[in-house]
Image (tube, rainbow, N blue to C red):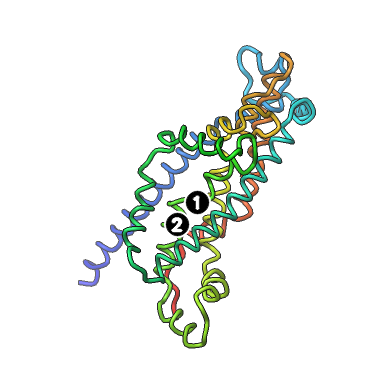
């Protein structure tokens, strides 16, 4: 009897291991498909023009040639584009964290008339494609006199329904007794939100911040429209399309510029990687 019971357990473990290896193999293949073009771009950024245009094409550079990076940094406005994107991404991400956490707190802990209807309306905005309201948004920004300004580019990205939903769902996992105990001690709503709720929600807040930073860093169409007549207000994604190098440096310089643009988001992700994983896996707060 004991031997018959152990056989199914052993077979189940083997099946589970096989499935795990298969999933890891599929994930590895998908990761390679995604990362190979980026690695090839990195390789091209260290090549001279003769190597880039060689036949057959070269995969690896013959040496560590840094002239493309020097060209990208000194003969273009990439430093200015990086500054613009950094300012816009940081401010938008901070404001998004505040608006999402405040709205999530209201939907999770406060009781008021029409709360559910308002929440469903917020979720309904996720179903509206951004391109549909692009023209009306531009006219609004233009009437406010915010064309070719930081505020004009950032204004549409201060609030995100997806982030509000994420924060609300997380706050619902927080034990209600925690708020009741805080109220008994004379703690008001804002004090509970600022001194208790936010510190225990730091993984989710970091996740919202990083996702907002990356999404605003990579936005292209809206900055292209709003900063249409000011080259100094362009972001990195728009500025990369407008790089004008000499013919002999166009390929390598563009690839070097693309690599420079990737550095900030890569650093942010690597620094806060553990926080992101913690924010995705965080569960309920135990009292």
Characterize the local packing of mark 1: few (<14), some (14-19) or many (20 or more) Cα atoms within 10 angstroms. some
102 relative position to 94: left or right: left
Q: Nearer the viewer, residue 1 or 48?
A: 48
Which quadrant holds residue 66? top right
**Quarter-of-image position of residue 65:** top right
Is residue 281 toward the left or the right of residue 9 in the image? right
* Outermost residue, top side: 55
Q: Residue at x 45, y 57 (%)?
A: 164
Write the residue at 56% across / 43% down: 216
Residue at x-position 37% and y-position 41% = 128
Contact between marks 1 and 2 (CB within 8 A): the answer is yes
**Residue 258 vs residue 216: left or right?**
right
Residue matched to label 2: 164
In the displayed orientation, state which residue is furthest to the bottom.
Answer: 184
> 93 or 285: which is nearer to us?
93
Query: In this figure, which residue is indicated by the disc labeled 1?
Result: 159
Position of residue 213 in the picture relative to residue 103 (left or right): right
**Does residue 109 lie above or below 155 as drawn?**
below
């Amino acid at each position: 009897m004991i031997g018959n019971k152990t056989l199914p357990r052993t077979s189940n473990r083997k099946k589970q291991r096989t499935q795990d290896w298969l999933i890891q193999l599929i994930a590895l293949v998908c990761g390679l498909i995604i990362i190979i073009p980026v690695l090839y771009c990195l390789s091209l950024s260290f090549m001279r023009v003769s190597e880039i245009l060689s036949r057959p094409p070269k995969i690896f550079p013959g040496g560590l040639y840094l002239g493309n990076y020097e060209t990208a940094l000194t003969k273009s406005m990439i430093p200015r584009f990086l500054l613009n994107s950094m300012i816009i991404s940081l401010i938008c991400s901070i404001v998004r964290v505040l608006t999402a956490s405040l709205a999530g707190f209201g939907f999770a802990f406060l009781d008021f008339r029409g709360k559910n209807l308002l929440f469903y309306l917020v979720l309904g905005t996720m179903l509206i494609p951004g391109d549909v309201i692009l023209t009306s948004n531009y006219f609004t920004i233009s009437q406010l006199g915010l064309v070719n300004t930081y505020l004009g580019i950032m204004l549409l990205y201060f609030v995100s329904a997806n982030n509000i939903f994420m924060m609300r769902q997380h706050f619902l996992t927080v034990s209600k007794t925690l708020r009741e105990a805080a109220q008994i001690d004379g703690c008001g709503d804002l004090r509970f939100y600022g001194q208790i709720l936010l510190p225990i929600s730091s993984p989710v807040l970091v996740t919202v911040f990083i996702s907002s930073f990356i999404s605003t860093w990579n936005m292209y169409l809206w900055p292209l429209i709003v900063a249409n007549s000011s080259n100094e207000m362009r972001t990195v994604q728009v500025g990369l399309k407008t790089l004008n190098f000499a013919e002999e440096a166009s390929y390598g310089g563009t690839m070097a510029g693309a690599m420079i643009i990737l550095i900030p988001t890569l650093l942010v992700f690597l620094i806060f990687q553990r926080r992101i994983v913690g924010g995705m896996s965080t569960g309920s707060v135990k009292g």
